[in-house]
Amino acid sequence: MQRSRLVVALVATAALSLLAVACGGDSESGGGSGSESGGGDLTGTIFATGSSTVEPITALVGESFNAENPGVDITVEGPGTGDGFKKFCAGEADISDASRKIKDEEIELCKAAGVEYVELAVASDALTVVTNVDNTAVSCLTLEDLYGLVGPESDSVATWAQASQFGATSQLPDAELKIFAPGQESGTYDSFVELALSKITEERLGEDPPKETRTFGGLADDNEIIRGIQSSPTSFGWVGFAFAEQAEVSEIQVDGGEGCVAPSAETVADGSYPLSRTLYIYVNQAKAQASPALQAFVTYYLANADQFVAEAGYVPLPADQLEASTAAWNAAIGGGSAAETTTTAAG
């Protein structure tokens, strides 16, 4: 699912007819069968930007929250984690969706602009390596294979088989390598470099190695990546788990040293899939303190995260991690009354 620059501004009755949200989300206030999200009296605007991976989750939360709060205009866009932090750290956004942790240089940007924030983990994800369904010659790749295909030394690699020049350990086909993957503005790009390439890059190139892949034309939109993968019988790329699961592509297993493991809810939850990661939202603390609507929205997000994360196709966080996010949020807003009134998704 991809929502680009989605503006959620629905009247309650119309929104309810569009929702596909399951009943019975967790409630901290005994909400019963209805929704406890501010009683419909909240007004204001909420702008969430950042990760296109996290965007579908935030958009689902926005749709459901808006069903009970039609006076709150919610805009959700997904230009990429890096581009989202640029806006967020300039004070232009209430929430920054992120498929990785904020970088040191982004922290400095926020400090320089006086933007204080709270970091909230909301979901788990599998960086899913994909190829065309017709590429039956490739079903599992080692980390060494991934490095040989797209590591920082591999600009000259034009076929899958040529990855052996840079350490690939599998017998790969002598077929054209066409890469469709996120660009450097994407947290999914950064996460892939960290999880799939960094260890081998350091082993081969020494300390302080380049934190990048080979050069290729990165794509900002996950749906563009999927279409690219589908366009070439020997394509290669990676996307978030939900995008791979919903598309006609072949998911490649990854061997992190203990055998081939397929991405799934189970292998992400138990940590056995080597390219598992955490998804986040970052909330501007001053804006939250000044906006009952934003406080209520984020509290609603966390209280119903499992429901919306699963609906978007990702993996709910372990309970202790979600509880830690909720505790961090409550501490950030001082347990305000708006937070206490927003806990249960529409049923």
Image (cartoon, rainbow, N blue to C red):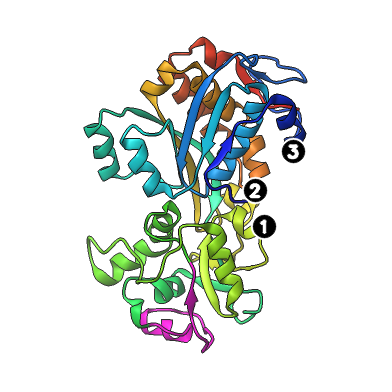
Does residue 248 lie above or below 33 as drawn? below
**Discs 3, 2 touching: Cβ within 8 Å:** no
Residue closer to the observer: 188 or 321:
188
Residue under label 1: 246
Mark 3 vs mark 2, CA separation in Å:
13 Å
96 relative position to 104: left or right: right
Residue at which label 2 appears: 313
Q: Residue furthest top?
A: 337
For marks 3 and 2, the one nearer the N-term is 3
Q: Amino acid at mark 1?
A: Gln
- Provide the residue span drawn in magenta: 157-180
Viewer can see residue 308: yes
Q: Position of residue 294 (x, y in %)?
A: 49, 23
Q: Considering depth in this image, is 17 or 222 the residue closer to the camera? A: 17
> At label 3, which amino acid type do we have?
Ala
Q: CA distance from mark 1 to mark 2?
A: 8 Å
Q: Which residue carries the number 3 mark?
A: 20
Contact between marks 1 and 2 (CB within 8 A): the answer is yes
Query: Which secondary structure, mark 1?
Result: loop
- Rendering quarter of residue 98: top left
Label ID, residue 235: none
The answer to if 179 sits in the magenta stretch is yes
